[in-house]
Image (tube, grey):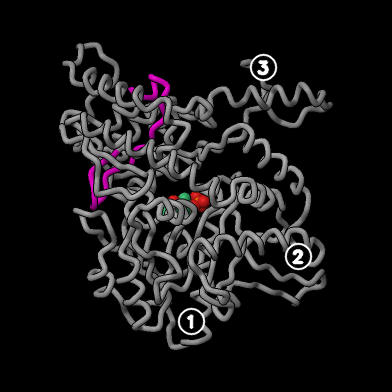
Amino acid sequence: MENTTVKPSPMPLTGSSAEEILNQLKGLKAKDVPWKTGKVLAYIYGLDDTARNLVETAYAHFLHENGLDPTAFPSLLKIENDLIASVRHLLQGDENVVGNFTSGGTESIMLSLKTARDYFRHHRPEIKRPEVIVSESTHPAFQKACHYLDMDIKVLPINTTTFKADPAAIEAAITENTVMLVASTPCYPFGVIDPVEEIAALAKARGIFCHVDACVGGMYLPFLRKLGHDIPKFDFAVDGVTSISCDLHKYGYAAKGASTILYKNDDIRRFQIYTCANWSGYTLSNSTVLSSKTGGPMAGAWAIFNYWGEEGYKKVVKATQDATQMVLDGIKEIPQLEVLGDPVMNLVAMVSNDENLSVFDISDMMQDKGWHIQVQLASPASKEAIHLNVNKENVPHIPQLIQDLKDCITALGQPKSEDAEGMAIDPAIIQGLFANFSPEVFESMQSMLGMGGGQVPDKLGFISTILNSLNIEQRNMVITEFMNKMFTPTSEE
Ligand SMILES: *Cc1c(COP(=O)(O)O)cnc(C)c1O
């Protein structure tokens, strides 16, 4: 069904038929990650066809409604309040807990920080530079939010055995300016749960906030607990937790554009709301960042919540966790790979313990075999790693996954022939090349990196290997330039 006759931009002079347009759009997906194969271990939180159709129908049903004004669309207000009630229940909040539906984890996190900033501006005006404390494994949405909100942030080392946040380091880093501590449940890179009770106790003792980032775990861990797994207290059951972010577009299985942010009470949430009566137009009061917004994502989430119910989620979590256990058992048979920490759910990071075996090469070779596997660059906590996000669609393919990993490792262990593709990359040479990095240098390196305007490189292993040998500042610069070039308007001929 491949359609390669995709018309270039700009907007054509005259239109085409709906059928032709839809065919072209479908054709555009040809090079996308083939997530329906069950061989993709990132990005997609898959549904069976029936559930997916329901979510799509519900989403489309509210696509054109506008969440700008809940008084004009009480349907959306009701849907949002229903969703928050469900998440509050799952996260053991009492009747004082309130929250809002947002477009994603990043927005939820950004709002948690804006709320903390403005709450402490009001209640503790002596704090001039509000500061947040996170850990290296905390999602970068917190650093991004601080960047946007002009707040200070300290990123602390984690425990290099457990890969969890280190409460002693956090305690030592707290200053007069600290307004919020953060715990991840679990963190995305390693799938381990930070010691929430200890971190929340530190916050409570100082009258500051403790945010729990349950973006990936909030719709999974409560069901895992119901299935009998030993999950430490991590939610509003922990004294001192003041806000929680919980995505619905991950293990809530809603379509993307769906997350929640919950607060201990509305005395805190008040500071999230932005109202402006100072203009000549309609009265603007936004609970979240977006103003005009579609009702699609929340209707999709509402549909799947009510279609599955708690029993349905429990079944899905069980299937997913069983799949993860199969992967972990399989990896144990591969002496060159080592799982980091003790992942509590379906997020698994593993490193190569053979210095001649690069995880980036494994990932590229696995791509040739139809797999899509994320990699993580080296950081102070761990060397470069493969990251697997195991989902239930992967289940029938797991024996093949393990076999393919073994085959790749065997193949990569063979001595390389002289004319083999690829080249050994000497970190010292790379460092030299990038020592005087600038946008101009990047221009001249684009072809070496396998990218021209608007094109995505086929294989990322080579680029990952280069990035891995750079320091954080250099990585940031290179990746920004890469992004800046990738988004180049389609050429007109
Ligand atoms: C995915 C994720 C986020 C960010 O969520 P987006 O929906 O991608 O904006 C934040 N924290 C954790 C732990 C996550 O897994």
Estimate the x, y position of residue 469 in percent, counting from the top left. 25, 40
Counting residues from the start of the chain, the first of labels 2 and 3 encountered is 3
Q: Which mark is residue 70?
A: 2
Q: Is residue 341 above or below residue 284?
A: above
Residue corresponding to mark 1: 120
Using the image as rendered, state which of residue 218 and residue 17 is in the foreground.
218
| Discs 1, 3 touching: Cβ within 8 Å | no
Please give left or right for residue 104 compared with residue 299 in the image: left
- Sort mark 2 into few (<14), some (14-19) or many (20+) by Cα contacts within 10 Å: some
Q: Which mark is residue 5?
A: 3
Between marks 2 and 3, how big is the CA–CA gap? 43 Å
Please give left or right for residue 29 compared with residue 152 in the image: right
Q: Nearer the viewer, mark 1 or mark 2?
A: 2
- Classify mark 3: helix, strand or loop: loop
Between marks 1 and 3, how big is the CA–CA gap? 56 Å
Asked whether the viewer can see residue 441, the reply is no
Which of the image's four quarters has the C terminus?
A: top right
Q: Is residue 300 magenta?
A: no
- Sort mark 3 into few (<14), some (14-19) or many (20+) by Cα contacts within 10 Å: few
Using the image as rendered, state which of residue 121 and residue 301 is in the foreground.
301
Between marks 1 and 2, how big is the CA–CA gap? 28 Å
Tell me the magenta residue range: 364-385
Q: Residue, x 64% and y 46% (percent of image)?
A: 307
- Classify mark 1: helix, strand or loop: helix
Estimate the x, y position of residue 470 in percent, counting from the top left. 28, 43
Q: Residue, x 35% and y 83% (percent of image)?
A: 206
Estimate the x, y position of residue 326 in percent, counting from the top left. 33, 34
* Amino acid type assigned to the residue bearing label 3 in the image: Thr
Label total for image: 3
* Amino acid type assigned to the residue bearing label 1 in the image: Phe
Q: Residue, x 43% and y 54% (percent of image)?
A: 226
